[in-house]
Amino acid sequence: MYIREGIAIALSALWNNKLRSFFTLLGNIIAVASIIIVVSMIQGMDAKVADIFTKRGADVFYVRKSEPSFSHSEERKSRYNPDLAPEDAEALKKQCPSIEYVVSAHNANGKIRHRETVLENAWVNGRSWEYAFVENMDIEEGRHFSQYEDLRARYVAVIGADIKDKLFKGANPVGKNVYIKGKKFKVIGVVQQRGMLLGNSQDEFVAIPMSTFRKIFGPQRESFYMMVKPNSPAFLNKAMDEATVVMRVRHKLKPKQDNDFGIFTSDAFINMYQNATRGIYSALVGVVALALIVGGVVIMNIMLMVVTERTREIGIRKAIGAKRRDVLWQFLVESLTLSIAGGIAGIIVGIILAIVISEAVALPYIIKVWSMVIALITVFIVGIIFGLYPANKAAMLNPIEALRYE
């Protein structure tokens, strides 16, 4: 009975004192909304990153100058690793029977122009002709460049959807010309739109043959890497072992020396990204804990004020037979109602803000039910902890003194 009555009294107090109620619940609203926003954004980005690398092929692995890492010490160590070169790609093709395709890859920023429209810093991707079999680059219009065009260093280009929209205003660009570093390239294909990743477009690029790239940008050996696809997904580990042996021989490494290059699958990128997001989760714990403590203290102070305001009511209840337990539960239920109301409001605010942020900065989001459950359980615990003291104070009041209170 007193549970239902306590909830009704708490809700009535919230409605009758709207401004005070808002500030009472603000700490919980901020904390819970923070949980919903951060969890939904991180979950959305995790799913997006995993989807992108999955589309590139679970059987594709990469050979780079170093392993992917967020560690400064590992990055400093990898600076002394030898640069890779197209000759390494040729060696893998010839000496690794388990490998089907080896894509030589270079990336650089370059100025791209069509007539009077100029893009200052678009990505120019040098690729060997096999890239169409390895990367997620389905053609929307036209075609990919051929092995012959790669070997002959032809000035042909395959562009992303954003390049098409910005330079050609959505018109069919196939057969038209663009200028890269002052050189004229014929557009032969447009890649289907791939969307955003970490707030950056995946469609603002131009892919050109590797031989042509090296001709106009120079060797740029440091940025060279390889994407490798085995004959079958079942041969992935075998292909990686073969590639490791070939690279160690080419780099003249002794048996006890560590690799001075990196060989890894897309899972390494996914794991590295998820390790980074775990750090964000850890930081979130501190922020949310602080907001919840502030919210809990505010609720406790409000409940102490409520106890003072209702001292005579408490005296009357005790005088007509209410036990200490009854008064304790009544005020504890009111505290829990305030705390949970803040949690529910925080969930609603968090979902709305997650949607707004996603639309504003083109980041994916996924609302997880478990994040809402955790938020509500947390504010429930906060309501108990910070509501227990004022509830106990109300329960301990002497009924005679309470009746005398003005």
Image (cartoon, rainbow, N blue to C red):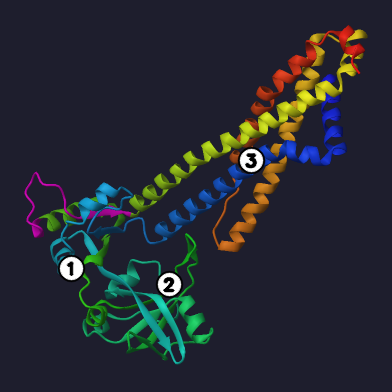
Which x, y percent locates residue 401? 87, 9
Q: Is residue 333 left or right of residue 255?
A: right
Residue denoted by label 1:
85
Q: Callout 1: 10 Å neighbours few (<14), some, many (20+)?
A: many
What secondary structure is the stretch in magenta mostly built from? loop
Taking depth in this image into account, of 184 and 325 the one nearest to the observer is 325
Q: In the image, what residue type sits under mark 2?
A: Asp
Q: Callout 3: 10 Å neighbours few (<14), some, many (20+)?
A: many
Closer to the observer: label 2 or label 1? 1
Taking depth in this image into account, of 122 and 23 the one nearest to the observer is 23
Give the mark nearer the N terminus: 2 vs 1.
1
Taking depth in this image into account, of 386 and 231 the one nearest to the observer is 386
Q: Which residues are magenta?
A: 249-265
Compared to 142, does 55 lie above or below? above
Closer to the observer: label 3 or label 1? 3
Q: How many marks?
A: 3
Q: Callout 2: 10 Å neighbours few (<14), some, many (20+)?
A: some
Residue denoted by label 2:
138
Residue 112 sits in which quadrant?
bottom left
User: Label 3 vs label 1: CA separation?
Assistant: 51 Å
Q: In the image, what residue type sits under mark 3?
A: Val
Give the mark nearer the N terminus: 3 vs 1.
3
For residue 258: magenta? yes
Q: Residue at x 19, y 67 (%)?
A: 89
Q: In the image, what residue type sits under mark 1?
A: Ala
Inspect this view and state whether residue 251 appears: yes
Report if the CB atoms under discs 3 and 1 are less than 8 Å apart: no
Residue 12 sits in which quadrant?
top right
Q: Which part of the image, by quadrant, shows the C terminus? A: top right
Query: Which label belongs to residue 32?
Result: 3
